[in-house]
Image (cartoon, grey):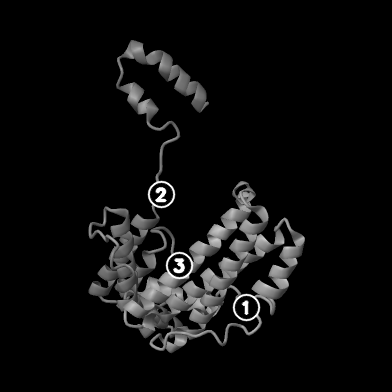
Amino acid sequence: MGLTGSHFVKVPADVAPETRRYYQQLTRFSAAFAFLADISMGTMGGALKRKEKLSARLGDILSLMYLASATLRRYEAEGRQAADAPLMHWAIWDCMFKAQNAFEGVIANFPNRFFAMILRRLVVFPLGRPYVVPSDRLGHEVARLLIEPGATRDRLTADVYLPTDVEEPVGALEAALLATVEAEPIEAKLKKAQKDGRFKPGLLVGGGVDVVWRKALEAGVISAAEYEVVERRNRLRDKVIRVDDFPYDFDLRAALAELPAEAGKPATAAVEKVAA
């Protein structure tokens, strides 16, 4: 299978045409893994357990092939959704590339160099390594599917608990995403008005980065309803990116101020010293 690129491996007739090569390559990797595991046990025996990096790489190969198999199974079980194909392709390429690297790691560090040469040149990679990292183009497609509300994203998060309370971190993230998508046409409208010269906000001093929206409302570029949509987006954005902010003494000074005067003097003096 290595010498023929697994092109002659039989694949079930009812699988999706776009996944046929994945089934063939996965069968090839499975056969190579079985052979590699047998050679490892045959040459090292119980010592394989003590060579933890080698055994861990073998475990990586097995788990990555399992993930690739699960990806193919899910793609078939969900009806070969064309919109989900980028997710499937990216997951398979990522799994197979990492499994390929794990194969290389085992062979490169195999104690018996004679068998290592046979494994590399005749068994596992006789024609070179077939997989590279998933392309940036494919990664962009996957990213778009993940950040845009839609059927693909709904299928992917079907079993994920999504709270509706914006005080919950995940709920705030989801609400901010939806609000951002809703505000995108309004942002485009504002940019077009600036480009056409119909809106010149000038120098914006004070009020933060969002003061431009108030200026746009006052200039009639956007309506009150559109301003409210943007304001809600901005509030949710700020909520998501907000980080914890503590006073330098973690409110210790305020806590000590509530103590009786005599009890609080030594501790207050210590706090003043640290602050200085």
Q: Position of residue 159 (x, y in %)?
A: 28, 64
Residue under pointer 2: 243
Q: Amino acid at mark 3?
A: Leu
Circle 1: residue type: Pro
How many angstroms separate mark 1 from mark 2 (CA)? 44 Å
Residue 5 at x, y percent in the picture:
61, 83
User: Which quadrant holds residue 98?
Assistant: bottom right
Residue indicated by mark 3? 67
Which residue is pictured at 52% across the width and 76% down the height? 27
The spot of residue 36 in percent (x, y) is 62, 65
Is the residue marked by circle 2 packed among few (<14), some (14-19), or many (20+) residues within 10 Å? Answer: few
Looking at the image, which residue is at 39% across and 52% down? 242
N-term mark: 3 or 1:
3
Mark 3 Cα shell of 10 Å, populated few (<14), some (14-19), many (≥20): some
Spatial CA distance of label 2 from label 3 is 35 Å
Q: Is residue 160 visible?
A: yes
In this view of the protein, which residue sits in the foreground, 270 or 218? 270
Side of 100 relative to 90 (left or right): right
Does the rendering let one see residue 221? Answer: no
**In this rendering, would 276 be left or right of 12?**
right
- Image position of 104 with respect to 132: above or below: above
User: Which label sits on residue 130?
Assistant: 1
Residue 183: x and y, percent?
A: 32, 73
Residue at image coords 64%, 58%: 42
User: Neighbour class for label 1 at 10 Å: few (<14), some, many (≥20)?
Assistant: few
Q: Secondary structure at mark 1?
A: loop
Q: Which sits earlier in the primary sequence, circle 2 or circle 3?
A: 3
Disc 2 marks a residue whose amino acid type is: Val
- Secondary structure at badge 2 equals loop
